[in-house]
Amino acid sequence: MKKPFILLFLTLVVSINLALPKDLLGSKLDEFEADATRERPADNSEGRTEESGTDKGPGIFDSILGAFLDPIFEGLLEALHEGGTLSYDRVSDIPGTYGFSRIEMRDVGEPVIPYFRLDFNYQDVQSDVIGLDGRVEIGYGPFGLQFRRTHYEEVEPNDELDLIQINGLYRMSFSKSFELDLGLGSLILNGNRHSTGLSFTIPVQYHPSRFVGIQFRPNLSSIKGNLITDLDLGFLFSKGIFSIQAGYRWLYSPDKDLNGPYIGTSFHF
């Protein structure tokens, strides 16, 4: 008598599992997408009452602060200009000079300020979630463009999510071993819906030798006021125009994450 009851119970459980919507099965990718794109209540500061008294204008503290920050801001603008100029000079036909030192011309195949670079990584996010990550960068001297697409796949329940970053880059190479970029563009999330937002990145890489390097690619994005933080820390082991890279990537929405180590290859020209 028990066997028919057990078979009926198992059949009922399987049927309910197949009939459940994907969201109810606890898809990690669905949860991340929903958290990264949901509407959040805006802070209402209109009801605040202002303190009594008249506006007396900037005080002595504001004046001191302005006098302190102005030269820092001017120095930053000068550093940005010189960094871009150095990047251009390193790829130009005629070597230039900077200060009292000669500019180091860029060698073909260097990972720093590449004309073309292609990365592919495999990321182990969780036991049932993987990420296939591809990145393309093209540029000349201080100007570059990067396209990065990460395709996440979940086994149980079966689900997919694409994260796409497109950024224009201002590339600053102060030497053969160091590069600092500023990037601005857009983030696209493709899952159950199509969502876009603003993206800002400050990638940096340092190569103490031609064979070993470290890179850090932070990317901050916003979709409907939701902050999406993408931190990529990796190591490169290079030979000629090819590199093996390994590292760890942290991807956060306000309350969810897709973190994990990765390994892959890089081609740079």
Image (cartoon, grey):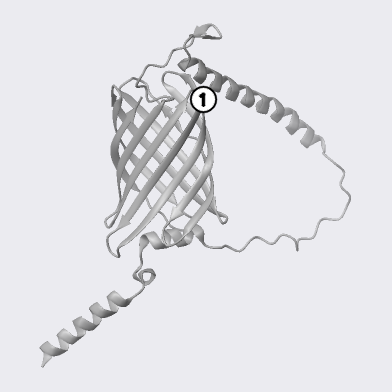
Q: Residue at x 42, y 29 (%)?
A: 205
Residue 73 falls in image quadrant: top right
- What kind of element bears circle 1? loop
Q: Residues within 10 Å of mark 1 (few under 14, many from 20)?
A: many
> Residue 22's spot in the image, x, y percent?
35, 69
Residue 217 rendering spot, x and y as whole percentages: 44, 37
Quadrant (top left, top right, bottom left, bottom right) of the C terminus? top left
Task: Tell how many labels.
Answer: 1
- Residue 92: where, in percent of width, then height? 48, 14
Three-letter amino acid code of the residue under disc 1 = Pro
Measured as percent of width and height from the top left, residue 176 is found at 42, 18
Whether residue 28 is visible to the viewer of this picture, yes or no, is yes
Q: Residue at x 29, y 21 (%)?
A: 240
In which quadrant of the rendered image does the N terminus lie? bottom left
Residue 7 located left or right of residue 113:
left
* Residue that numbered label 1 is attached to: 142
Q: In the image shown, does 267 or 131 lie closer to the viewer?
A: 267
Q: Is residue 254 visible?
A: no
Which residue is farthest top? 100
Q: Is residue 131 left or right of residue 9?
A: right
